[in-house]
Amino acid sequence: MKLAILSRAPRSYSTQRLRTAAADRGHTVKVLNTLRFGIDLAGDEPDLQFRGKPLSTYDAILPRIGNSVTYFGTAVVRQFEQMDVYTPNTSWGIANSRDKLRATQILSRHQIGMPATTFVRDRADVIPAIERVGGAPVVIKLLEGTQGIGVILAPELKVAEAIIETLQSTRQNVLIQRFVKESKGRDIRALVVGDRVVAAMRRVAQGDEFRSNVHRGGSVEAVTLDPEFEKVAVRAAQIMGLRVAGVDMLEGNDGPLVMEVNSSPGLEGIERATNLDVAGAIIDYIDNQVAFPEIDVRQRLTVSTGYGVAEIQVGEASDLVGKSLGDSGLRERDITALTLHQGTQVIPNPHAGHVLEAGDRLLCFGKLEEMRSMIPTRRKRRTKLKKLPEQPIHDVADAPAHPSQGSTPVYGGDAGGS
């Protein structure tokens, strides 16, 4: 295959190892500076320029997008995707993994174990937020920090409040996270390639340092993961849209706790700790998958008028409970079940014999009107516009309460907007 490694650091250990592994396997490989691409949107088909000239054809790319060029880098990867060039890491997967808040939101939706985390913006909400995650000490994280930079351990409540206030005053967004004491300055880095963990190491912080990153002076050792840790690492990477990822986990009392999913994991530490050819495993995986470029399913399936993708919940009172997919009547309504979520099990392309249970979730493609009729009706907001009042602006404190509100003020509650 002809492979392009997108990297601004051609002399780094990781880039050189990947380039060497590809060349040793007989592939044509080039390292291309991510910032030298031009996204060509003027032609009949998606295209790219490189150094001002039309880009030659590639079978696959391997993005090594640095944190400082995430926006442009993901735009370049997205253009390759539009050109049907295979990439193990999707543009949306890279973008999601870079934003710690967004990554946490996505993983929590899929019941991935993580340290208790909260995100607030108003100063008055900081102390309640700290108490919600278990109180001090707490870990304060910048949303786009990397290599342990922007991760602070606050030992006391007042110290945490002062740090957060200072960071927010400089327009920094921060996460507040429970400090997992039982991890004792240790974490696990699992290197996921495809649907398996190819190597894993334990990182141990030095001295009083609680961050175990190698860049912070942490030591590393090879480790054999329990099946539970392997399963969580692979699921976390796949949920994020990454087929090559470094998944960092803490060893909590109740099992693995995912801290971060890294879309451009460094290879030096883990290869030297495990003495395994991780770069070779990545190249072999790309070689085996190159004929199957990642497809944005929603983008492709929603181009048909009247058709789309929706998730159908099987409620307790649903007439689908106890029926097999074949007897559910979905086919007759022009609806195809793509994936069945049953408890913690995910069943792709479920067959007609699968029996539906209360609480199941079906990811379906079909007629939107038919699927809408199967989704419980939500209470709709008032859509009619009223006439502008004679006094459109007045002092809220002096305004009479609405009859339906009694003496309740019209502000300060759980408002739906402002």
Image: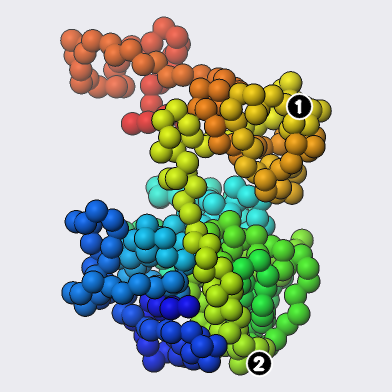
Secondary structure, mark 2, is loop
Give the side of residue 122 with respect to residue 262, left or right.
Answer: left
Residue 279 or residue 119, whichever sits in front? 279
Q: Is residue 289 above or below residue 370?
A: below
Residue type, label 2: Asn
Farthest top residue in view: 403
Q: CA distance from mark 2 to mark 1?
A: 53 Å
Q: Quadrant of residue 210?
A: bottom right
Residue at 80% over, 37% down: 353
Give the side of residue 302 with respect to residue 282, left or right.
Answer: left
Residue at 67% over, 73% down: 197
Residue 142 appearing in the image: no
Residue 111 or residue 4, whichever sits in front? 4
Residue 313 appearing in the image: yes
Label 1 belongs to which residue?
Answer: 327
Q: Position of residue 206 (x, y in %)?
A: 60, 87
Q: Position of residue 100 (x, y in %)?
A: 48, 60
